[in-house]
Amino acid sequence: EIVLTQSPGTLSLSPGERATLSCRASQSVSSNYLAWHQQKPGQAPRLLIYGASSRATGIPDRFSGSGSGTDFTLTISRLEPEDFAVYFCQQYGNSPLTFGQGTRLEI
Amino acid sequence: QVQLVESGGGLVKPGGSLRLSCAASGFTLSDYYMSWIRQAPGKGLQWVSYISSSGKSTYYADSVMGRFTVSRDIAKNSQYLQMTSLRAEDTGVYYCARVSGEGAIDYWGQGTLVTVSS
């Protein structure tokens, strides 16, 4: 199975700053089927990005995804207070579906 | 809007059984694959199962094969996870999730906690 490794484990930034989160796969992700999700305490996770770079419905354009093959990046251009959360990547190009361990974005 | 609401979690002894439910609204189960995904305390997310949009095909992680069974009731627009022979390592939050046409998880429930302990 594909192992997804996210870095850094924790990212400390301030509102207005730019956040760059990394997700590296142990082998190439088929069709670049890589998604990013956001999770806040007590809430259901929310899909942000699918297909490595497509924003899900209703997701602000400050969120962007890039990458291909084994290296993927989630960028938040200007952090808003509500963006401080845990972010995890998910690959769905190869069976079984697997997830990264998450990056905690904190103030 | 799309909503997924899980129920049925709780404390169960090793070797016991539990049935989780997921009530869906805002869409029809027969149009989508559905999944169960779990997260053990302090651990990452682990895919558990799929059920196809037709309901005719089911898929399981090796760790639960033969012990867990996924099913659905179209009339109730709900899916279920019957868990038997539960082990301590099955402890965690279980999420119900919808699978998009492309295969991404596009909607999640809030999760239900399953604790397997004597």
Image: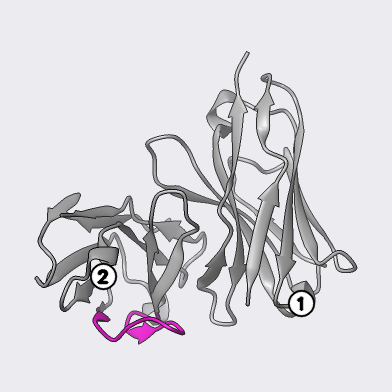
Quadrant occupied by the N terminus of chain A: bottom left
Q: Residue at x 10, y 62 (%)?
A: A14
Label 1 marks a residue whose chain is B
Residue under circle 2?
Answer: A70
Q: Amino acid at mark 1?
A: Thr
Residue under circle 1?
Answer: B28
Contact, mark 1 vs mark 2 (Cβ under 8 Å): no
Dividing the picture into quadrants, the one containing residue B103 is bottom right
Tag 1 secondary structure = loop
Quadrant occupied by the C terminus of chain A: bottom left
Decide if residue B98 is on the left or right side of residue B82: left
Q: Residue at x 20, y 49 (%)?
A: A9
The numbered disc on residue A87 is none
Report the span colored magenta: A50-66
Mark 1 or 2: in front is: 1
Q: Amino acid at mark 2?
A: Thr
Q: Is residue A64 magenta?
A: yes
Image coords of residue B72 (percent x, y): 82, 60
Q: Is residue B48 magenta?
A: no
Image coords of residue A100 (percent x, y): 34, 55
Image: A16 above or below A7: below
